[in-house]
Amino acid sequence: MVQPPAEAPAAPAAAAGAPVPRIYLLHPLMVGPLPAWDAALERVAGLGFNTVLLPPPFAPGGTGNLYQLSDPDAPHPIFEAAGDSLALLETLAGKARAQGLELYVDLVLDRVAADGRLAAEQPGWFAPEQAAGLPDPRREPPDRNTRAARWDEPGSAAALTQYWAPRLARFAAAGVAGFRCDAPARLPAAIWRQLIEAAPGARFLAWTAGLPADALPGLAGAGFAAVFDSLAWWDLRADWLVEEAARLASLAPAIATLEAPFGRRLSAQDPDPAIDPGLAEAFARRHLRLAAGIGAGMLVPMGFEYGSRRPLDPARDKPADWDWLVTHAPYDLSAAIRGANAALADRRMGAAELRPLSGPGAPVVALLRCEGGDARHARAATLVLANADLHRTATADATALLPGAGGAFTRFTPALPDSGGALAPGAALLLQPGEVRLLEAAPPAPIRLAEPAGDAGARAAAAAPRIGIEAIDPMVDDGRFPVKRTVGEIVQVGCDLICDGHDKLGAVLLWRAADEDTWQELRLRPLGNDRWAASFPLERMGRYFFAVETWRDAFATFRDELEKKHKARVPIALELEEGRQLVAGAGPTLAELAARIAAGSEEERLSLLLAPQTATLMAAADPRPFRARSAEIPVEAERTGAGFASWYELFPRSQAADPARHGTFDDVIRQLPRIRRMGFDVLYFPPIHPIGLKNRKGRNNSLTPGPDDPGSPYAIGSEAGGHDAIHPELGTLEDFRRLVAAAAGQGLELALDFAIQCSPDHPWLREHKDWFDWRPDGTIRYAENPPKKYEDIVNVDFYKPGAVPDLWIALRDVVRFWCEEGCGCSAWITRTPSPSPSGNG
């Protein structure tokens, strides 16, 4: 049995911080003999790749399939090379280096050709390959021409390891910079560690594209320098790619897979070029830019750039097939590939987090690739924005996307010249159909505040409140407006009290009426989870205030610790002396108790310190250290009628039995029993003040009033008076007082519409012209609701220099006047200066 080393080897030195591999797979059967490789490699380098990948360049079995190995020590006949496979690899590596390329080779260790030399010489190492589970369309199905390596059998595994380890070392010495390890899950991680250790200068890349999620944990600790994602199969709608990225990140950086070597072509997946030939190209371009955005490198199989729809064939392809493909290419992505490679040129191998900033099925796919494996500490990031629709435009809105970056990155600039504009908070980018933009960012520099000189900062911090008072309830707009309750109610107050450490807190609820100077106080009780509560009564109508006060309760903290230590049988002699000192320091009223504690036995001292009476005395004497108090919260205690009432509105002038006569207060008095029988509590009037004559409106708001039209009750004011007068046709002030008394006899209250509007005849216009708005031609500004004008009404200007404070005081006095005449102020309605329509109601 092969034993694993004590520790998994670190990633190869060449991998850490090295440029990411930009891999182009060259198909030997399409390139041909060695002389043709110089031009092929030159073309690969010209596309911006830094790595060329070859399928196994060794002698195959009878089928000629590159992945059915016969003899790893002999070269494939297609190369027409003299010497063994090492000589071939040295030649190919030299040709690759001449073009600035690294040579990688596919490594197939899980199977060999059934009719090959290796299977014949070592039949005990292999067995007929069996299908495992459902067929995988991304892999060749097992057939009778293949034998599976018995890596699960200890003896065979040891022999296979001893066979392959020195060969891999020789391949690396010959110039092979890395290996793409096919079917990595078929070998135990311990075996991979030994093989990777045998060739320390080479990178080993695990072919994990399409590998089931449950197979990945078995590769942990194997030492792979990189893995491969399944980008080639992603439709930009589902969320599995990000989930796969998180799984792969636990193993190694993930190289983006444009197409699986010898698998189904991207251009043949979606859409059908027979419907729209341009869609296949757009589809391929989009995936190419996605690979450049999210990958730790990328893998591009030969022919991708020319839109090949036919998969590479590992046994039957030939150079003429390549010539035909180039001649009949539906498009050429060479320039786009060079752009994608340019985007990857500065990227380095290392951990990365792929974070989704958009949800599944979003019109714009937004992926954030964070260098370093954690967005919170990433040194750089690439934002990939992709329009998932090949037919319609879409908008990427920073307001919706950037919060998903967790604040680590807030401003992105184009990574490439064709990546459009920048994306910052509040910005939006329009993406054309199928467009992919790559943007990059560095973490924003934090705001640095000037540090106080000397020890001022530390002193200020120490003086800051130690206890937080939060989530006070009830409270309206942080105390800006009073809480509304009715007299007789109990106000239930709750709050959160938070302090550092495990110290016990003391807390009280304070309250007072607004006309009192002395606060009443009640202890808050803890409810658990930092929540405290208490209540206070509203005994009078009017304004109250309450507040919360809290402090560190030193004795309660001591008492709690003493009790716990005593129960745990911890020695408490020193604690007992500390308790005596706390009692002695509480003041002369507790001197006798302190003396009793000092003179008692340990048991007596413990009993005295834990006694409830001691706790009560110490609470009363508590100096309340680290005291904190909340703001004062107003509470308005109103009469019961303010909570609910049923109102009945009528026009007093419409209550006469004769339609030709103006109604009076006496007419209203006759209606009171009927109104009360309907169950109403409040009788509500529109303005009852004198109505102006100037510009008076007629019936239905007409501009031509008749001699008997009464005008709008909201055009307040005439020679008979203003807001504190009564319209003469309704009656006198004595008549109104009689109405108030009659209503009270029926259990009704009166409410008046408080309309802060004036007619041009209002006495205020003569006495206080500076309360109104005058136009440049000397005329007064009438009430307007453009294009309508209400010439019978003018509005006061509350903020004219002459209006403050006189107008405000005058309006206050109007309210007080009518309250004193028996109209409950809680029943008043305040109308904005916008006028109401006039009529004969």
Image: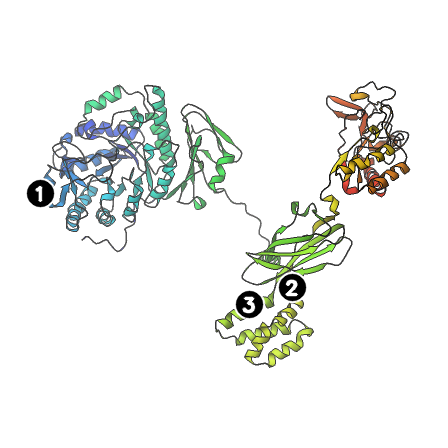
Can you see residue 287? yes
Task: Describe the element under mark 2 as helix, strand or loop.
Answer: loop
- Name the N-terminal-most of marks 3 and 2: 3
Q: Which mark is residue 560?
A: 3
Tag 1: amino acid: Glu
Tell me: 292 left or right of 123: right
Give how far across and how far down residue 626 sits, in percent.
Answer: 62, 61
Q: Are marks 2 and 1 in contact (CB under 8 Å)?
A: no
- Name the N-terminal-most of marks 1 and 3: 1
Which residue is denoted by mark 2 in the rendering? 624
Tag 3: amino acid: Asp
Tag 2: amino acid: Arg
Can you see residue 773? no
Q: Which mark is residue 121?
A: 1
Question: In the rendered view of the protein, which quadrant contains the C terminus?
Answer: top right
Tell me: 742 left or right of 148: right
Q: Are marks 3 and 2 in contact (CB under 8 Å)?
A: no
- Name the N-terminal-most of marks 2 and 1: 1
Task: Describe the element under mark 3 as helix, strand or loop.
Answer: helix
Give how far across and how far down residue 474 sits, in percent.
Answer: 65, 49
Give how far across and how far down residue 300 sits, in percent.
Answer: 29, 31
Q: Name the mark nearer the viewer: 3 or 2.
A: 3
